């Protein structure tokens, strides 16, 4: 527990949470370690966990064959590389839908904190101020990711038209 609270404090989605609030979240965390190349979860898997990177690097990949007319054997494409303090799997907290990408450890001894949706939901319901702050931070994090994706799409559209 003593190592988990400082790790949570480094994560953007826990910005401005008190030590007491972080301790409540730490109580529902599980730590997992991955070697380079280990898959954390696959695209299209069912989801209900949030991940916080404590140490190491995680690549987020998508299979082009699932969303385009790419050949079925097309290699997965890395769309993001995440490092210490970053989170992924946030959408699972909201909709419990299928994973939109694959997450894979890109460095040996990649350590993650895993937070199950139901456990975190119970903590938030029991402590509404913590829940409010966490949801505000999650919304800000997701908004930043959406804006970044929007810029990338606009860039591809712009360059795509320039090449024609």
Image (spheres, rainbow, N blue to C red):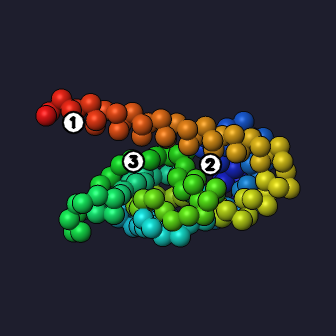
Q: What kind of element bears circle 3? A: strand
Q: What kind of element bears circle 2? A: helix
Mark before the other along the chain sequence, 2 or 3: 2
Identify residue for label 2.
7
Disc on res. 25: none
Identify residue for label 1.
160
Residue 95 in sight from this viewpoint: yes
Task: Report, in whole angstroms, how far the alpha carbon at label 1 lies from the one at label 3.
Answer: 24 Å
Mark before the other along the chain sequence, 1 or 3: 3
- Name the residue: 53% across, 46% down: 86
Identify residue for label 3.
81
Please state if 151 lies on the left or on the right of 2 as rendered: left
Q: Nearer the viewer, mark 1 or mark 3?
A: 1
Position of residue 79 relative to residue 12, above or below, is: below
- Name the residue: 39% across, 67% down: 38
Residue 68: % across, % down: 29, 58
Picture quadrant where residue 104 is located: bottom left
Please state if 83 lies on the left or on the right of 10 as rendered: left
Q: Quadrant of the C terminus?
A: top left
Position of residue 135 relative to residue 75, above or below, is: above
Picture quadrant where residue 85 is located: top right
- Name the residue: 48% across, 70% down: 45
């Amino acid at each position: 527990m003593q190592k988990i609270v400082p790790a949570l404090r480094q994560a953007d989605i826990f910005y401005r949470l008190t030590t007491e609030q972080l301790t409540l979240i730490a109580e529902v965390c599980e730590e997992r370690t991955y070697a380079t190349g280990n898959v954390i979860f696959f695209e299209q898997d069912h989801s209900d966990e949030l991940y916080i990177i404590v140490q190491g690097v995680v690549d987020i990949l998508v299979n082009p064959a699932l969303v385009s007319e790419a050949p079925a054997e097309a290699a997965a494409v890395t769309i993001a590389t995440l490092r210490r303090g970053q989170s992924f799997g946030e959408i699972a907290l909201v909709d419990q839908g299928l994973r939109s990408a694959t997450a894979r450890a890109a460095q040996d001894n990649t350590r993650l904190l895993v937070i199950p949706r139901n456990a975190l939901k119970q903590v938030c319901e029991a402590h509404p101020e913590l829940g409010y702050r966490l949801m505000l931070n999650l919304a800000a994090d997701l908004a930043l990711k959406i804006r970044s994706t929007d810029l990338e799409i606009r860039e591809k559209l712009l360059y795509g038209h320039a090449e024609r």
